């Protein structure tokens, strides 16, 4: 079990960043929660380079249980499937954009001194 960490202002009501909150947030970012539509979840899996079948299994495992251990195992299974290629950050940024956890995502290209969309960075990647 993780220790509970106090977050937010000390003067306000007590809020604790518990293990359950972190696991639920991770599941939301990976498109595993019921709040994420099936089409969005499939797009997140595609952007992250995770097999659709494995993502659907993890999603069903997450939604089919109320136990924290099962939730954590579902999140860990998807995280373990994400391949760490050079385009990892653009893929994660696109996934965050799809689930609505991030506004418009832009990547800074220092050599060109401009911002570009991570969707464009993914389009430039060789297959």
Image (tube, rainbow, N blue to C red):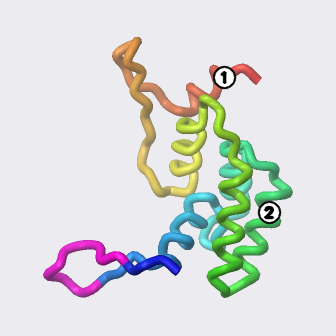
- Say which quarter of the image contains residue 112: top left
Residue at point 60% right, 40% down? 91
- Say which quarter of the image contains residue 99: bottom right
Furthest-top residue in view?
Answer: 111
Quadrant for the C terminus in the image: top right
Residue at point 67% right, 45% down? 48
Describe residue 82's horizontal placement relative to residue 121 as left or right: right
- Say which quarter of the image contains residue 61: bottom right
What main secondary structure does the magenta stretch of the protein show? loop
10 is within the stretch colored magenta: yes
Describe residue 24's horizontal placement relative to residue 3 as left or right: right
Which structural element holds mark 1? loop
Q: How many marks?
A: 2
The correct choice, above or below, for 98 with respect to 16 in the image is above
Residue bearing mark 1:
125
The correct choice, above or below, for 84 with respect to 69 in the image is above
Residue at point 57% right, 26% down? 121
Image spot of residue 64 (x, y percent):
76, 81
Q: What stretch of residues is rendered in magenta? A: 5-14
Image spot of residue 90 (x, y percent):
55, 36
Furthest-left residue in view?
Answer: 11
Residue at point 67% right, 63% down? 76
Image spot of residue 70 (x, y percent):
71, 78
Task: Decide which of 103, 68 is in the foreground and name it.
Answer: 68
Q: Neighbour class for label 2 at 10 Å: few (<14), some, many (≥20)? A: some
Q: Neighbour class for label 1 at 10 Å: few (<14), some, many (≥20)? A: few
Residue bearing mark 2:
56
């Amino acid at each position: 079990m993780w220790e509970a960490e106090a977050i937010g202002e000390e003067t306000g009501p007590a809020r604790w960043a518990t293990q359950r909150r972190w696991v639920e947030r991770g599941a939301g970012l990976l498109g595993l929660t019921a709040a994420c539509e099936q089409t969005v979840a499939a797009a997140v899996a595609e952007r992250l380079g995770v097999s659709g079948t494995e993502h659907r299994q993890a999603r069903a495992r997450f939604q089919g249980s109320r136990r924290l251990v099962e939730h954590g195992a579902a999140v860990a299974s998807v995280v373990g499937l994400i391949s760490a290629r050079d385009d990892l950050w653009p893929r994660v940024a696109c996934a965050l954009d799809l689930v609505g956890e991030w506004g418009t995502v832009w990547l800074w290209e220092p050599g060109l001194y401009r911002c570009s969309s991570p969707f464009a960075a993914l389009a430039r990647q060789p297959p």
